[in-house]
Image (tube, grey):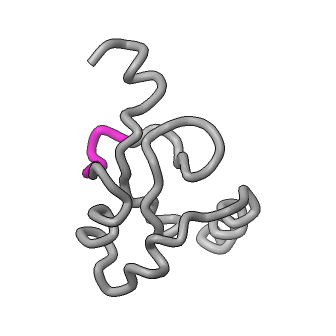
Amino acid sequence: MGAGAAASGSKKWYMDYTLMKCVQDCDGPLPCGGLASSWDATFKTQSRCCNEKMWWDKKACNAVPNSVLDRNESVIYIMK
């Protein structure tokens, strides 16, 4: 993988444990969740990510957050 691909992400899906949703490995608006860390398991589809990482509530996991506010509220809640 070249430096450009690493900088923009793989577009694969990984679990964001703050949101408890699978997000894409990319920078930009949602469904991007930022660049995945080297330890994050990545998946070709959001569905596969949810099947592996949040099988007990796939519906909630598959619901891609639709605003930056969703992300900010989750972070504030976790930090309390």
Residue 1 rendering spot, x and y as whole percentages: 26, 18
Residue 20, image x, y percentages: 47, 70
Looking at the picture, tell me which residue is in the foreground, 79 or 25: 25
The answer to whether 30 is drawn above or below residue 46 in the figure is above
Please report the residue visible at 55 percent of the width from the left and 64 percent of the height from the top. 64
Q: Is residue 43 magenta?
A: no
Magenta highlight: main SS: loop
**Farthest residue in the top direction?**
3
Give the magenta range: 37-42
Q: Quadrant of the C terminus?
A: bottom right
Which of the two residues, 32 or 47, is positioned nearer the viewer here?
47
- Asked if the stretch drawn in magenta spans residue 38, the answer is yes
User: Which residue occupies 62% across, 38% down?
Assistant: 28
Where residue 3 appears, as percent x and y from the top left, is 37, 13
Q: Nearer the viewer, residue 37 or 68?
A: 68
Q: Give me the residue at 38% from left, 60% from top.
A: 46
Where on the picture, by quarter, is residue 11? Answer: top left
Q: Is residue 26 left or right of residue 54?
A: right
Q: Judge from the rendering whether residue 6 lies leftward or rightward of residue 27; answer left or right.
A: left
The structure residue drawn at horizontal position 47% and vertical position 67%, both measured from the top left corner, is 21
In this rendering, is residue 33 above or below 9? Answer: below
